Image (tube, rainbow, N blue to C red):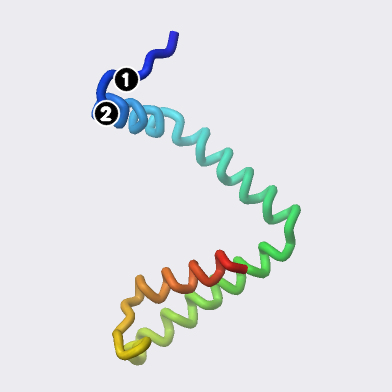
Amino acid sequence: MFHLPATFPKCTTRVVRNIEYFQSNYIIVFIGLIVYCILTSPLLLIAIAALLGACYIIRVRNESKEVALLGQKLTLAHQYALSVCASLVT
């Protein structure tokens, strides 16, 4: 029989143990869903390619000079985050 944990720390411990124990199952399901999404929507493949291309361009540009937006320097992580956010919109 299943019981809810009495406290929040017990709940988080249970979740972490669950993820560790079933990690391979979660990975297989995740990969299966990704493959299904790509096969059923070829435009998604184009969006992924565009995102990877943008990340490559960002990396190459950062090696040569700093990138600034509105007078603020953007770190590599910020630039990657902006490109991921832009790709989610598409």
Residue at x-position 53% and y-position 72%:
86
Residue 24's spot in the image, x, y percent? 48, 35
The vertical placement of 81 against 41, above or below, is below
Residue found at the very far top of the displayed protein: 1
Quadrant (top left, top right, bottom left, bottom right) of the N terminus = top left
Q: In the picture provided, is 24 more to the left or to the right than 37? A: left
Relative height, residue 84 to residue 28 (above, below): below
Name the foreground residue: 72 vs 75.
72
- In the rendered structure, which amino acid carries the disc numbered 1? Pro
**Compared to 13, does 42 lie above or below?**
below
Horizontal side of residue 85 vs 70, given as left or right:
right
The reply, left or right, for residue 33 in relation to residue 18 is: right
Q: Residues within 10 Å of mark 2 (few under 14, many from 20)?
A: few
Secondary structure, mark 1, is: loop
Query: What kind of element bears circle 2?
Result: helix
**Quarter of the rendering containing residue 17:** top left
Read off the residue under disc 1.
Answer: 5
Tell me where residue 45 sits by quadrant: bottom right
- Looking at the image, which is closer to me, 18 or 11? 11
13 displayed left or right of 58: left
Discs 1, 2 touching: Cβ within 8 Å: yes
Occupied quadrant, residue 51? bottom right
Residue 31 in picture, x, y percent from top left: 58, 46
Give how far across and how far down residue 30 sits, in percent.
56, 43
The disc placed on residue 8 is 2
What residue sits 35% from the left and 86% below the top? 63
Residue 59 on image: x %, y %: 42, 79
Is the residue marked by circle 1 packed among few (<14), some (14-19), or many (20+) residues within 10 Å? Answer: few
Q: What's the residue at 33%, 80% (across, down)?
A: 74
**Toward the viewer: 72 or 65?**
72
Image quarter hosting the C terminus: bottom right
Instruction: For marks 1 and 2, give the CA distance.
Output: 7 Å
